Image (spheres, coloured by chain):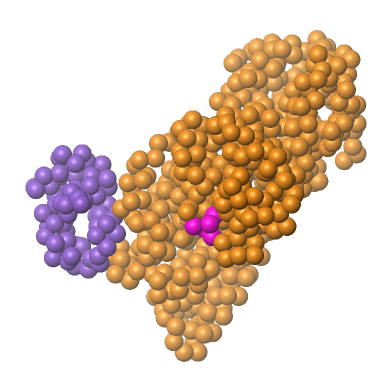
Amino acid sequence: MIEYHKILKKIDSIKRKSNFKNLKIKFLCNFNQLFLEDYLNYFLLEKKISVKILKSEFDQIDQSIINLKGRKDINYLIIGEDINSRINFNDKEFNNYLTQLESRLDNLKIAKDKNPNLKVIYFNLIKKRDFSGDFYNNLNKKILNFNERIEKKCLQTQIQIFDIQSISNYIGLENFYDDEKNFLAKTLYSEYALNLISKELSKQIYASENIRKKCLVLDLDNTLWGGVLGEEGPYSIKLGNSFEGEKFTKFQKYIKDLSNKGIILAISSKNNLDDAKECFKKNPNMILNFSDFTSYRINWREKYININEISSELNIGKDSMVFFDDSKFERDQMLKMNPEINVIDVPNDVSKYIKSIDETAFFLSQKTLDEDLKKKKQYQIISKFNGSKAKFRDTNSFLKSLKMKISFSKVNKKNFDRCVQMSVKTNQFNLTNLRFSETSLKNYLKKNDTISLVGSLKDKFGDHGITCMAIARRSKNKFIIDSFLLSCRIFGRQVEKALLDELIRKVKKQTQTIHGIYNKSKKNKEFANFFIKNGFIKKTNKNFEIKIKEYKYKKNQLFKIKYEKN
Amino acid sequence: MKKIEDNIKDILSTILKVPIKKIDPSFSYKSSKKWDSLNHIKIIMALESNFKIKIKPDQAVEMMTYKKIIQNIKKII
């Protein structure tokens, strides 16, 4: 637990860097959320999310929801209704109260329809505190039923439930509330409860931002097993079958689960490579296989150099990598030399390793898509690709040798979630930087006359999955490219040219002019001249235009192109 | 170990965004516009967590000056 005065100090001391995500959050509560705001602010800052809390009126939830009227400046609306801050009810009053709360959800749905990018988080109900006799027993049953009902309703409307009841059950109602503080300021919750509520809330927000990290780089000795392999040998390290060994086994199982959820694993360890390989092969208690690691640097060099190499080998940005090492020296050095890498503050107690990763929420995501599950394989392909590239003298003959095939389809039901995910997660080759939520993409496609291409790439190394997308929208007699993006996994293959070629082939049946949009960001600078290179004429800093008859398609096609029926 | 006074100054300075130097014995809610009812609650909560004490509502209402805070905290701990 972090004490309140320390939280305030930490909020002041964390430097907001340019790579932090900015969010605007508005609380609507029937209690004073003053401390909750500070705690949430801190836990989000820890996750590199900088928050602006918007002002709100105390206990004016329903009125404030109606007054929102499609306000576009709010990213998150957090609705906190605590039954224990209401005065006691009789049976009839209580039923009316629950009905009122249910109709609140209808108003929230209207607010969400008006602003499709708004995310709403709704606290479920905590049990009534004054627990005495049959009436309260009955009342708590109704609360449980109510929570089940709203959970179903929220699923349909994409309102997120925040399960505050589980937190109150976990620490007990007596520890959850702080009566003295409540009389003074209507702040309701104890310091301990505030810690847990805001920590979980920050994790939920992080997960719903779809910004989970891609790769976990692990040390070996005293991280994946106890003891030093070089000294103790593959059979004597601590793993399984002992009090200490079980802790490492449990940690390995957790890492294996992360890998199964699409997190890429890598090793950076000061060890002899052959010893490490032998250990993975021979130790009978090993849960992880050596093949679970897509990249490894097992040598005696500095780890910050190793991690740079892993980053280039897998083409994963350093800010998407997480470093886990039991040695404080290695962690401090990594932070100093590679400040973009996310370094886990590893506890001394091995049984707390899992918690230390969980609490960062780095690998949390609201949805794990089929595409995520294929990632391990896809990054293994990248690793092979980079190895194979070195053998060829010129790029073209190398690319031809790959026998690449792209299959295109429109944005459809099958690829819809992946399209939303790519629009949110792609930062480097994302020319317009237009981000879609599920609702905003649906509305965008409904409202506009569009041509879309969603591409899936295969080559001799394997299936890369859905990795590129372009959407153009009709505006009077021309088309404007609102989205043009490519996953970093398939850079260096000229897929972007094939995507533009196909888009223009599609569009030319309907128009003579097409406009490309380039919105500059810190990460997409490298592709600023993409449209110019392809013959577009600069109209403004952001807008590029080409007459379709002047567009030059690539000769000597590198790809076999296929269209899927939608 | 930091003195009680230093801890209190630290808290007032963090919440009210006032340099520590400016917090002298005459410092009170009148010295800073930011010392409003909401920040007063924050000050009380921060004092409780810093000194690991419980401040009663009537004491909290009284603690509107730097001096009164010191007096009350010394009484409680």
Q: Position of residue B58 (x, y in %)?
A: 19, 67
> Is the C terminus of chain A in the top left, top right, bottom left or bottom right quadrant?
top right
Chain A visual colour? orange
* Viewer can see residue A410: no
Indicate whether residue A423 is drawn in magenta. Answer: no
Residue A350 in magenta stretch? yes
Q: Image quadrant for the N terminus of chain A?
A: bottom left
- Residue A83, how many percent across, how many down? 46, 71
Q: Residue A220: x and y, percent?
A: 61, 46
The residue closer to the viewer here, A549 or A40, is A40
> Residues in magenta?
A349-353
The residue positioned 55% from the left and 32% from the top of the image is A302
Residue found at the far left of this picture? B26
Given residues A86 and A369, the one toward you in this image is: A369
- The residue nearer to you, when weighing A448 against B77, is B77
Report which quarter residue B17 is drawn in: top left
Taking the image as shown, residue A1 lies to the left or right of residue A495, namely left
Report whether A196 appears left or right of A455: left
SS majority, magenta: helix
Q: Nearer the viewer, residue A372 or A395?
A: A395
Left or right: A528 in relation to A394: left
Colour given to chain B in the rendered image? purple
Who's the residue at 71% across and 54% down the image?
Answer: A283
Note whether residue A190 is visible.
yes
- The residue sitting at 77% across, 13% down in the picture is A547
| Residue furthest bottom as drawn | A133
